[in-house]
Image (cartoon, helix red, strand yellow):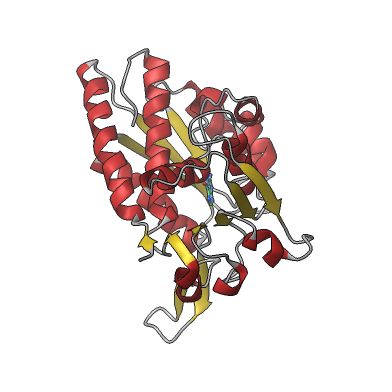
């Protein structure tokens, strides 16, 4: 029987443990604070940040939301960033990507204080991750590691094929999985749009992580028996539903499930983990900045 990995249940467990950490910080007079910054009114981004804010409230953290107009000048955003860097009640924050064209997201990231960069996107934090000394593991790759652990799949010695080389998922996940630590020690292949014979690479893998943003690109014919399949994709495709669309992953679930020993669904797999790991990083940031020890899950 294929194990359909329940990301909601794993995320619930992590959130419950983080709530204990929030209580410990509370005993020391500290409420962890997470700020989200949204520039413009992209509907998907609005949904994502409101979920992140709701997550904060649910475990007793302070959620702060800042919204700027879609035509805001870069300096306006830089001033907001400078204020958040200086605000001691904000332990972590993020600027939701994408930002409008007049703003250079790379410059935005460079201005975020690395100590508050709970996305783990700042060059200093990327460097630390690659060096094996991560301050904040980026949320989605960290969530994937936690899901593998929850499914009792140890990457050590395994062949992992990651489909996708994004800054947010593919590249940091490859770095995490090759590290000489628990949850690492894998042999990693990173595939992308110029990869020749993708199916050959996925068939060789013990673990396939699809994170490319292409609806149902990976199907069962591209997998060997007993593969673990982690689907990071969330794609809106037209459908005869009330909203006019449905969400599908980068993996064709039904055919992949026939081959996989374990697989994550979309929705309800990686998505809830990404949000839980953002709370994790914020609790970690608060613990570091306020010098209060907590037992992170
Ligand atoms: N947009 C989509 N995913 C993310 C994320 O993880 N962080 C930020 N800041 N923006 C995003």
The image shows residue 243, relative to residue 20, as above or below, that is below
Observer-nearest of 107 and 238: 238
> In the rendered view, does 20 fall on the left or right side of 38?
left
Residue depicted at 39% across the width and 45% down the height: 152
Residue depicted at 38% across the width and 49% down the height: 151
Tell me how many marks there are: 0
> In the rendered view, does 291 fall on the left or right side of 256?
left
* Residue extending furthest toward the top: 291
Residue depicted at 44% across the width and 54% down the height: 270
Question: Residue 77: in sight, yes or no?
Answer: no
Observer-nearest of 40 and 192: 192
The image shows residue 257, relative to residue 290, as above or below, that is below
The image shows residue 294, relative to residue 45, as above or below, that is above
Question: In which quadrant is the C terminus drawn?
Answer: top left
Observer-nearest of 294 and 67: 294
> Where is residue 223 shown, x and y percent of the image?
58, 66
The image shows residue 134, relative to residue 184, as above or below, that is above
> Where is residue 1 shown, x and y percent of the image?
35, 66
> Where is residue 3 shown, x and y percent of the image?
36, 60
Residue depicted at 24% across the width and 43% down the height: 58
> Where is residue 257 shown, x and y percent of the image?
45, 69
Question: Residue 108: in sight, yes or no?
Answer: yes
Report which quarter residue 262 is drawn in: bottom left
């Amino acid at each position: 029987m294929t194990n359909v990995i329940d990301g909601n249940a794993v995320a619930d467990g992590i959130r419950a443990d983080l709530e204990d950490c929030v209580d410990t910080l509370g005993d020391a007079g500290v409420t962890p604070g997470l700020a989200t910054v949204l520039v413009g009114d992209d509907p998907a981004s609005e949904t994502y940040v409101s979920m992140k804010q709701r997550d904060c409230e649910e475990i007793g953290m302070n959620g702060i939301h800042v919204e700027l107009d879609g035509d805001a000048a870069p300096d306006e955003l830089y001033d907001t960033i400078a204020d958040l860097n200086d605000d001691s009640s904000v332990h972590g924050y993020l600027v939701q990507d994408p930002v409008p064209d007049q703003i250079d997201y790379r410059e935005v990231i460079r201005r975020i204080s690395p100590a508050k960069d709970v996305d783990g996107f700042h060059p200093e934090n990327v460097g630390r991750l690659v060096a094996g000394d991560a301050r904040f593991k980026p949320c989605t790759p960290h969530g994937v590691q936690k899901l593998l652990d929850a499914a009792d799949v140890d990457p050590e010695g395994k062949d992992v094929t990651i489909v996708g080389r994004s800054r947010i998922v593919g590249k940091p996940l490859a770095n995490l999985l090759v590290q000489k630590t628990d949850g690492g020690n894998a042999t990693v292949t990173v595939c992308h749009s110029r990869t020749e014979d993708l199916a050959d690479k996925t068939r060789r893998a013990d673990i396939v992580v699809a994170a490319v943003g292409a609806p149902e690109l990976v199907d069962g014919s591209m997998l060997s028996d007993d593969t673990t399949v982690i689907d990071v994709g969330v794609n809106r495709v037209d459908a005869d539903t009330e909203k006019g669309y449905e969400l599908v992953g980068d993996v064709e679930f039904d055919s992949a499930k026939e081959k996989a020993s374990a697989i994550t669904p979309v929705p309800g797999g990686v998505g809830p983990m990404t949000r839980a790991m953002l709370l994790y990083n914020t609790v970690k940031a608060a613990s570091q900045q306020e010098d209060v020890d907590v037992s992170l899950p």
